[in-house]
Image (cartoon, grey):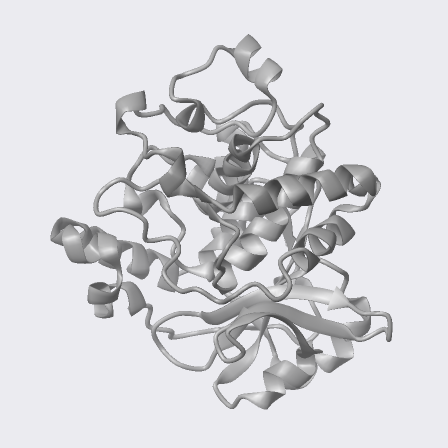
Amino acid sequence: MPSIARRKLLAASPFLLGSTLTFADQKKAGGDSVFGTAKAQSQLLPMQTIFKGEARFKAIVKKAIDERWTELPIGKRVIACAKELHGLPYENWTLEIHDQIESPSVNLNGLDCWTFFEQSMGLARMLGIEKSEYTPQDLLRQIEFTRYRGGNCSGNYLERIHYLAEWFFENDARGTIEHLTPTLPGAERIHGRKISEMTTLWKSYRYLRMNPELRGPMGETETRVAAMPVYHVPKQKVAALESDLRDGDVIGIATKYHGGFCSHVGLIHRTDDGVARFMHASRDYKKVVIDKSISGYLNKYSKHAGAIIGRPLDVSETVTDSETYQKNLKKLIG
């Protein structure tokens, strides 16, 4: 894999603050910068729409401060946050929050597989920025930076990363993870995959259903994602890698079927018995669970082809320069 230049964390997201900030304002605010121009305050969605579970957020932050999670390595910090979400109910479509305006959002009351890993990682990254107190806006900044292409959301649904395979490339380019998969023993590229879930199942997605003009551009996005050099470790080879997996590693579950590259996602949690278990928001169990070993989980289902693996990086590794990000992405995707 090409070496990736990293730059230190610099600034807060102007989208969430409602106006473009000066450089001095950004440094004072703390958080991640974005590479775009924010929409006006009048076009932002209300906090009660974009942030649910503030009481749980405050409880997690208090526990993190009391137990000094900020001193933990990023992977262990991710799992410390994830364990606070253990047992919460599975809830689908938590990202489809409006008919037109796209926005970073958090729901700590109900989680699907994407929001579980994303919010665990977002909390951990937020806690990696030293502050006297943390607010919901701090977590929303982290979610914006990892959820949206280029780290920026200006209200357009197409800015969101809708396919997990692309998320690994995007977040490697911005220094939030190290995408390990292509360099792992036994990794194989997935060829000939048709990517079409969003446009085939458009009636299931609120924004696509209410805005038919988005479906054509979404199809173009799917064509672009299909051309990406996506690798996975076939499931029969994952057991041999389990000893090298760490707490907080992001595991995309590669599927053998067309539609997308991945069908599910979760985190590695190495429990006291030494087993690298798959922690995820499970539709089957209807809640966040600590499951079998990752190899055991993969082999339980015939539809699973293998694993895509990324390792979280601390906030000091974050790329905030647009030109550096674009160069990194070009190296990764070609």
Q: Can residue 323 be seen in this view?
A: yes
Viewer-proximal residue, 102 or 316? 102
Q: In which quarter of the image is residue 157?
A: top left
Residue lying farthest to the front in this orientation? 55
Q: Compared to 305, does 157 lie above or below?
A: above
Viewer-proximal residue, 189 or 204? 204
Residue 134 at x, y percent in the picture: 63, 30
Q: Quadrant of residue 296?
A: bottom right
Looking at the image, residue 261 sits to the left or right of residue 10; the answer is left
Viewer-proximal residue, 139 or 250? 139
Residue lying farthest to the right in this orientation? 273
Residue 28 at x, y percent in the picture: 61, 14
Q: Compared to 283, does 229 lie above or below?
A: above
Viewer-proximal residue, 334 or 280? 280
Residue visible at 55% across and 52% down in the picture: 118
Q: Compared to 120, does 266 lie above or below?
A: below
Q: Can residue 252 be seen in this view?
A: no
Residue 300 at x, y percent in the picture: 59, 89
Residue visible at 23% across and 59% down in the picture: 219
The quadrant in which the N terminus is found is bottom right
Residue 40 at x, y percent in the picture: 29, 21
Looking at the image, residue 98 sits to the left or right of residue 271; the answer is left
Q: Compared to 260, does 108 lie above or below?
A: above
